[in-house]
Image (cartoon, rainbow, N blue to C red):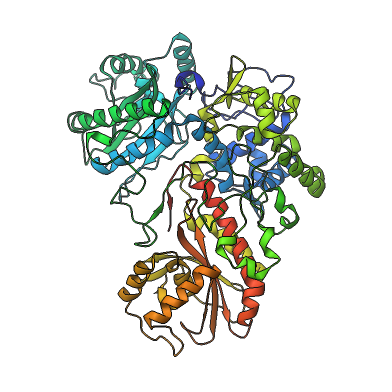
Amino acid sequence: MPASPRSSSSGPSRPAPSQGVPSRAGASGSEASGSARGGAEVPDEAVTPLIRGIAVLRRLTEADGAASLSGLERATGLARSTVDRITATLARMGYVRLDGRDAVLAPRLMELGNAYLAALRLPRVLDPYADALADELDESVSLAVCDRDGIRFIHQATRRRAMSLSFRIGDLLPAERTAPGPLFASEWGEEEWNRWRERRAADPEDRGFPAVPARSRPYGGGTDTSALPAAQRPTVGDDFEERAAEAGRSGWALDDQLIEPGLVAVSMPVREAGRIACVVNVVSHTSRHSAADLRETLLPRLRAAVAAMERALELDAQGAPDAPEPLGHGPKPTRSASPARATATTGVTGVIEPGYAEGTAGAGGTGAPAGPGDIADSTRPGDAAGPPNPGDAAGPPNPGDDTGDPAAAGRATERPTERPPTPSGLADWTAASKQELGREFVESLARGLTVITAFGEGRAELSLTAVAQTTGLARATARRALITLEHLGYVTAHDRVFRLTPRVLGLGFPPLSRTTLPEIAAPHLTELSQRLRDSVSLAVLTGAEVQYTGHVSPRGIMSVNLTVGTRLPAYATSLGRAILADLPEARALEVLADGAPEAVTAETMTDPDVFRAELDKIRRSGYALVEGELEQGLRSIAVPVRERGGRVVAAVNVAMHSSRRTAEACVSDVLPELHATATRIEADLRIAGRFRRVQLS
């Protein structure tokens, strides 16, 4: 396995105006318009629609994930018809959702950033160590890589406090205002330093880094500079070259309130093959630690963690199956080891842990995006049948396989299986999309973005031929896409192979990296409610109760009246039973006993033996149907929602008055739609949760 790239040379370049996409005033080296690299002219073979489509994605990212179409028109300088065609194409790919006159980033867009993180390999190996360190220190810990003259986060283990940190995976910060920055800069050459000086001169306020406050306050050095003219006063970052030299000598660096008052951090590099692969950053605030205290108290433990990380990288590069123990004691870090993390079955503060392996889905769960096999059913509002992901080891499922047979649709173990992708999958999908949408579908944009997903774990470096073979694109088409992506700074080329750069994370990852399960499910619940004209809900298990985390009711005189946050006994609800059926029988009965079942109505099931038989039935059928047990006249049917490992983390149901449908009609008419909705939620959850924890509520 190839070693991690040298961070300072693999990041994106400084953009310049191009192709009708104006530069933002004060935009800096790494995050301006998303156009040309270092002021370079656009290559003759560049794909203009791809340049424009990426510009739209960047503007949506800067707008925190949502913007009006007219706002995108103004921000990009593109014609409204061009914006409409680009957003229609992105919606077809599942990368954005069109909500009236607004475009909203969708979780599937994260597959672009996932491709970079998988190819990088560092998150898979090091994230558990960063999480273990955060648990031990009770402080936020992040991993960062160098992105030209900035640093970009690839992992965040944030503590949940009233005074919390808001940095996200993919956020870009100016190197001189961080603790990791001096460490990366200690390896810079003259070219990198000149680029940094040019960016500082062009953007004196750091306006090109929206993740941090403007650099307008004076630097708090020891000399009184108040008498100097404002233009001559030293500002934050003026001593960066000295800090970089010191970091190179000492092997660690501090951030003493350089980003904003009260924020302090200490960093150490993780090296592989003699170069800095990434930097571990421990962040706190001055009410907990001073900068000096960070150095004296936390630095020794940080050193131990870094040593374990470097050993883990070495073993991983050698193909060794076992990593060293973290921090010199305790078991090897795993995603389930932390006592601070609750699961869906113990509390609503639970999280869905990342699943790093590609194409993994547990038994009973599909967890894959809809693909070309679903084109015939993709005209439903909100149903984004995106292109196949060539970088995914398992291809897209076909939700249509079961929907013709109500009995098959109800069997959880017979949900659609994943099939391997074929090189013709993308071509078939783009052809079908073009036929359906006509000129509103921009093929060259879809193909260009798909090139990014060709990279992944074990595919950090790809030749032009490999990209063409992986995606099924013609060699000439793949070549033009790669030329465009290199021009924009999203790939680098060396010795006839291409690598993704950290800048790929700037395509929607920061705003989407905080997406919760209820936010992922919301558009799918709304679409199902609108189609069935019934109430639809999402819930998680907390103790012996279910807590509603999402709810949509149709407009009407009579509907199921529930609000988000409502708790109901799990034993008496279809949502609760759908989740309980996934637990070991002993645990499920323990939850039932904790809930002290009482007869809410004459129909309520309270006998343990009867309840055990009911759970067995739900396990076999894959759904729970409850009639009149919570309230007379209320009928509901629910199916589980699984994370990428196959564990049930929530459930979704449809509830109605018993006069609307018979129980048989619920199974024959509602259940297939309910399963399809759960599959779409799981598909988004699978992508969103690959390299980050997804909060359940």
Q: How many marks?
A: 0
Q: Quadrant of residue 476?
A: top right
Question: Taking 527 as reference, is 603 above or below it?
Answer: below
Residue 472 is at least partly visible in this image = yes
Of 404 and 126, which appears nearest the observer?
404
Q: Is residue 475 left or right of residue 625?
A: right
Foreground residue among 561 and 639: 639
* Relative vertical location of residue 167 with respect to residue 121 in this rendering, above or below: below
Q: Residue 522: percent from the left, percent from the top?
A: 55, 59
Side of 49 where 625 appears, left or right:
left
Q: Residue at x 70, y 35 (%)?
A: 447
The residue nearer to you, when weighing 497 against 32, is 497
Q: Residue furthest bottom?
A: 602
Instruction: Give percent across and percent down for residue 215.
Output: 40, 29
On-image quarter of the C terminus = bottom left
Please provide percent x and percent y for residue 673: 64, 66
* Residue 256 visible from this viewpoint: no
Relative to residue 50, is residue 586 depicted above or below? below
Q: Is residue 294 above or below residue 630?
A: above
Residue 191 locus on image (x, y percent): 48, 11
Q: Name which residue lies at 65% across and 26% down.
A: 466
